[in-house]
Image (tube, helix red, strand yellow):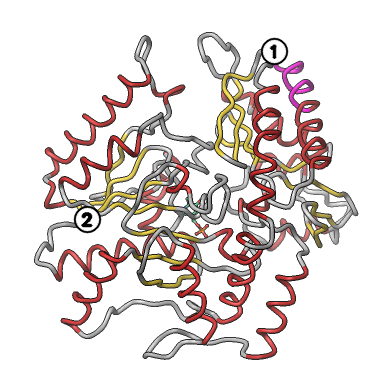
Amino acid sequence: MPDTSLPNSWDARAKAHSFFGFTDLPSIRDRGTVVLTHGDGPYVIDTEGNRYLDANSGLWNMIAGFDHPALTIAAQDQYETFPGYHAFFGRMSDQAVMLSEKLIEVSPFETGKVFYTNSGSEANDTMVKMLWFLHAAEGRPQARKIITRGNAYHGVTAVSASMTGKPYNSVFGLPLPGFLHLTCPHYWREGRDGESEADFLARLVTELEEMIAREGADTIAGFFAEPVQGAGGVIPPVAGYFDAILPVLRAHGIPVIADEVITGFGRTGALWGCESYGFRPDAIISSKALTAGYFPMGAILLGPELSDRLQRATDVIEEFPHGFTASGHPVGCAIALKAIELVTEGGLLDNVNRLIPGFEAGLAKLAAHEHIGEWRGRGLMGALEAVRDKATKTPFEAHLSVSERIANTCTDHGLICRPLGQSIVLCPPFILTDAQMEEMFDKLSRALDQVFADVA
Ligand SMILES: *Cc1c(COP(=O)(O)O)cnc(C)c1O
């Protein structure tokens, strides 16, 4: 119920004139909204003065916490020097030039080129346009179909939502035609009774081969995959996945794009998720941790082959007719340069690797609970999936909203974590201390006990 007794409360004001996206409306009707004012390391503080340990790093992105002085100083300095510019007409800021050099230097590519956007969705959308443009210029205008996987999350623009493999997009009449989805490579949930992991993988390879044969290899523009599916519920692929499917795609000349919006810059313990899984994509989509969440920015990193081909395609018509007003914003670029330095030289990646064993042990310990069916994760991203019956993997009834209740109970204890389907997702900032990790697992453990006692 809206609190009419306090019409000027932050909650009432938030509800009056702010339209919420990706928000369960019954929850905010019952529990109210949380209006935040500032941060302190990995904690955020609301208008009532409540502190929350944000175990989701905002939305996976605030890897350096919420008040890192090096990032705010980089922003301040750049605002004073050159507070805004675009990247059209052969002009761009010195910061954009330097960031492109740095991104290629830290990428798995020996050389390549970078294109900037303001978000991950725009970067995926732009990459699809690049592929359509490229195939048309190379004489394959029919090569327009895009292959992704069930449970993939690639964003919310009309194209990136079409790539996303989630049922909720049907309310928009999406996906658009020509966006194809393979089976999500999640063995625990998608594997059939009696099917071994190797058999499951073989089935996925056959499915891809059959899809390519059915659709026609010459109609397919590209394949996009997150190294670990993030918003699908933190799903590392079945063992051997990329090694098995990439040769099929390569044999048909289908470009492979790694959507590293979450996995880029250290989340999996390596700088890139594709390095963790030992594969080399043709291009990388980056956003989120790129600026440690201190500026909206996305980037496409084109490997040498795709950048050469796109350059030749563009030479013919003398222009790639695409760009965003704020792409390559000098303040965003200055912040990204500092964020990358913090990850690679400032100890953040080292701390991720220091934290991983304890993080995995904490998840494994909670997974011993009779109502946790599986813990899964890679690096500093993990999930616990709630089930009514562990042996049969039977989920709790949807109307019980178990994962929402767990997350809400956590919030009451001062911990922010995210319900995703029947799972709870943890992806804390890279600056976490051991004591803060202990606090995270303690609070989550108490919330699990409370909610499972209520619903069991
Ligand atoms: C968040 C996300 C996106 C979309 O990024 P936005 O900045 O929200 O548009 C795309 N891909 C993946 C893997 C993501 O996690």
Q: Nearer the viewer, residue 361 or 385?
A: 361
Q: Which is the main secondary structure of the residues drawn in magenta?
A: helix
Q: Residues within 10 Å of mark 2 (few under 14, many from 20)?
A: many
Q: Nearer the viewer, residue 309 or 449?
A: 309
Residue occupying the far left of the picture? 139
- Mark in front: 1 vs 2: 2
Vertical placement of residue 43 versus 77, above or below: above
Q: Which mark is residue 221?
A: 2
| Residue 302 quadrant | bottom left
Q: Secondary structure at mark 1?
A: loop
- Label count reads 2
User: What residue lies at 80% left-to-right and 52% top-to-bottom?
Assistant: 43
Query: Is 455 inside the magenta-drawn segment?
Result: yes
User: What residue lies at 48% left-to-right and 85% top-to-bottom?
Assistant: 86
The image shows residue 25 at horizontal and vertical percentages of: 64, 44
Q: Earlier in the sequence, mark 1 or mark 2?
A: 2
Q: Describe residue 125's horizontal placement relative to residue 427 as left or right.
A: left
The image shows residue 325 at horizontal and vertical percentages of: 47, 81
Residue labelled with disc 1: 456
Q: State which quarter of the image contains the N terminus.
A: top right
Q: Which mark is residue 348?
A: none
Q: Which residues are magenta?
A: 447-456
Q: Are marks 1 and 2 in contact (CB under 8 Å)?
A: no
